[in-house]
Image (cartoon, rainbow, N blue to C red):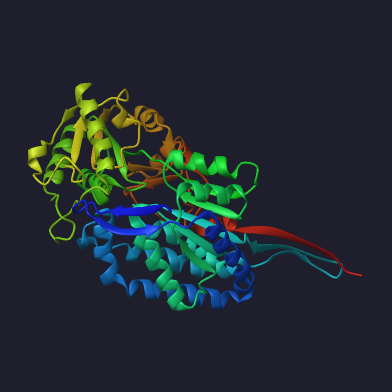
Amino acid sequence: MTTISLISPIDGSVYAERVALPLVAAQDVVSRTRAAQHAWSALPLERRIATVMAGIDALEAMARKIVPELAWQMGRPVRYGGEFGGVRERASYMAAIAPDTLADEVIEQSAQFTRVLAREPQGVVFVIAPWNYPYLTAINTLVPALIAGNAVVLKHASQTLLAGERLAEAFHAAGVPEDVFQNVVLDHATSEALIAARAFDFVNFTGSVGGGRAIERAAAGTFTSTGLELGGKDPGYVRADADLDAAVDGLMDGAMFNAGQCCCGIERIYVHESLFDAFVDKAEAWLRGQHLGNPLEHDTTIGPMAHARFAAIVRDQIAEAVAQGARALIEVADFPADDGGAYLAPQILVDVTHDMRVMREESFGPVVGIMKVRNDAEAIHLMNDCAYGLTASIWTRDVQAARAIGAQLQTGTVLMNRCDYLDPALCWTGCKDTGRGTALSALGYHALTRVKSYHLKKA
């Protein structure tokens, strides 16, 4: 028997414990889910949409419970009110486009032939969700998967065990059958064994590069479709023509929100030499205006990292960079809540280079390095000098320049004058070690369905 413990970053206490399902019990869950999927997919699309959106309503009604639970589980300050705005935006968009996106595409309807491209659900979708945005990341796949007629098995991260339970509670209350959407607690070995046994028709994983490799190894030879969103080291570039104040506010918030634990958070900033000194001064002032503390207190803007071991990685990167010549603008004493554990003082590093890990390896914490660049070409080179490619943020008044720069960037999404944002109408995707696959937009439905072609010759 494997017991999974959720250690709260607030005080290091055990906030929740659950027993992981053994393999035989997990196989039974998947069998029941597969058996239930056919009846769910046979329901009219309009009914599935209405039921799923009722699930979103039920989830929002649980906000007073969920928001403090998030603080206890992974440290996000309660002042931000959870993830409900994004959950509603993404779910509503995917529901709105479903009728057109999932409709048959009629190629020919004539006296002689009917030729049609139809979309059918994959079947059973396995969602492995991360702890940093436990509701948003799950919703990205859960909502379109159910709407498209799939059944879903959700395995949440051990750091946010209760998020999966709340999602199941809400959707079951709304009328999604329990066997159609099952929340499970599994250890890594059982998850991989199920994938290797071809238990699922599609696997969506959001997490580390190492985790993504484990998923691919487990799925090897099964021909199971996978969607993988892995690491990130997202850059921001401030051109000479940028609105300086807007760039500082946007990029620093993008770097520090959620204690820097955002898939598309800003981890490195390149600033044109004409704006560099002013940008750094304003960025330092911005950061000194933040409050590190208990996430249950409403004046806290930066809470603890989700686990002390995550904070240790960031501390090591900072210390190594300083030893190599970087200059830290913040003293730990400036943020007295820093306890050497999960509570980590936010940091800005200057005099950084790409020889330092902090500028090339994922940090996933409240630290950002800022470098001076001479022109667009140098910025493009440095932005691409990384193993990851999720988003890139360009700050400029010139739309054509942003398009031209974006065309040269190795990234999934190019953002102009904003960052750390996911537009549900646009495909969420990445390249390089960030992984592969598509989520949200019409292409998200394409990943969660398969094409069936009909070529019907009439007598």
Closer to the camera in the image, 115 or 430: 430
User: Where residue 37 sits: x, y (%)?
Assistant: 61, 68
Closer to the camera in the image, 120 or 224: 224
User: Where residue 190 sits: x, y (%)?
Assistant: 51, 50
User: Where residue 334 sits: x, y (%)?
Assistant: 8, 41
Residue at the far front in the pictured view = 1
User: Where residue 106 sits: x, y (%)?
Assistant: 72, 65
Instruction: Decide: is 308 above or below 1.
Output: above
Displayed quadrant of residue 402: top left
Q: Is residue 20 left or right of residue 454?
A: left
Closer to the camera in the image, 443 or 450: 450
Q: Residue at x 36, y 38 (%)?
A: 233
Q: Residue at x 38, y 61 (%)?
A: 135
Closer to the camera in the image, 427 or 276: 427
Is residue 238 in view? no
Q: Residue at x 39, y 54 (%)?
A: 422
Q: Is residue 75 left or right of residue 382?
A: left
Q: Residue at x 41, y 67 (%)?
A: 167
Tell me the quadrant of the picture where the C terminus can be found: bottom right
Q: Is residue 221 left or right of residue 213?
A: right
